[in-house]
Every structure is written in structure tokens, then in C-alpha cells.
Amino acid sequence: MFSKAVTGLTLSSLKLSIGSGANLLTSTQTLTTTDNITWTVGNLAALTKTSAVCTLALSPSAAVKDTYGNALVTGATANFTIDATRPPRRSRRSPLQPNTPITQLTIAFSEPVKAWACRPFP
């Protein structure tokens, strides 16, 4: 995210790495924006499926300019952690009587979960 609109930003201005490794971004990834302030790097699923500490770096570039024509002279980096470990599932059974319907079920996760759906049991 920039403080004002910029043009000329391309994937080649960015580097995504694990540790001090090579740039993982290729032409498979996408770079999009709707306002030239907030930019989104897409198609990262294959690069982010394992746990890792990553760095996203923006290189200074004469091609990246604000609306006044000022070039980006200072780069930036951001570190983030990918936690690909699934939260453990814990289940607790209540003593049930045969042929007695379950009227309530409580589910507790050990960490925040964003995408979860309840599906009928077979």
C-alpha cells in the first residue's frame, strides 16, 4: 500500500523470498490494483502452502512514479510468517442413549479459523 497513487509498478519491482533465498515470484503471479494505492499479488497458493518465514521486498525504481512524476527512490521490506499447520481437532463425546437425537454440539478450535463449513454426516 502506498500513501498516494503510483504507476509503473510491476512484478519485477517485487521479490518474495523465504529467508535470503531466490525470488519466488514468476510470470504465474499477478499484480493488480483498483486505485493504484493498494496493490495485490495474486496466484500465491503454490508458493505459500508450507510453513515459512517470508520477506516481500520492493526495490527502488525510476519506473514507479507518483502522480507528480516523482520516482520511487527508497525500497521497502515486510516480513511475514506462513503457518500452514492445521489446528488440531479435538472431539468430545457425550454419553448418548441409543436412538436419542443430538440437540446441541459444541465445536472449539485452538486458533482462529476463517473458512469452515458444517456438512451433514453420511
Image: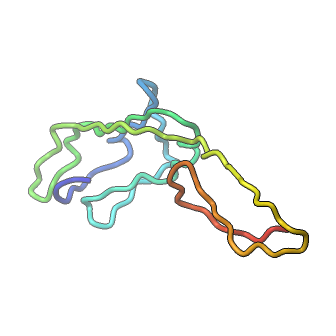
Residue reaching furthest top? 20
Residue 27 at x, y = what percent? 49, 46
Residue 53 at x, y = what percent? 45, 33
The residue located at (46%, 30%) in the rendering is 18
The residue located at (58%, 53%) in the rendering is 109
The total of numbered circles placed on residues is: 0
Viewer-side residue, 25 vs 18: 18
Judging from the image, the colouring scheme is rainbow
Residue 80 at x, y = what percent? 39, 39
Quadrant hosting residue 106: bottom right
Q: Quadrant of the C terminus?
A: bottom right
Residue reaching furthest right? 98
- Compared with residue 7, is residue 18 higher up or lower down, i.e. above or below? above
Viewer-side residue, 48 vs 33: 48
Q: Is residue 2 left or right of residue 24?
A: left
The residue located at (41%, 24%) in the rendering is 20
Q: Is residue 47 visible?
A: no
Q: Is residue 88 visible?
A: yes
The residue located at (57%, 42%) in the rendering is 84
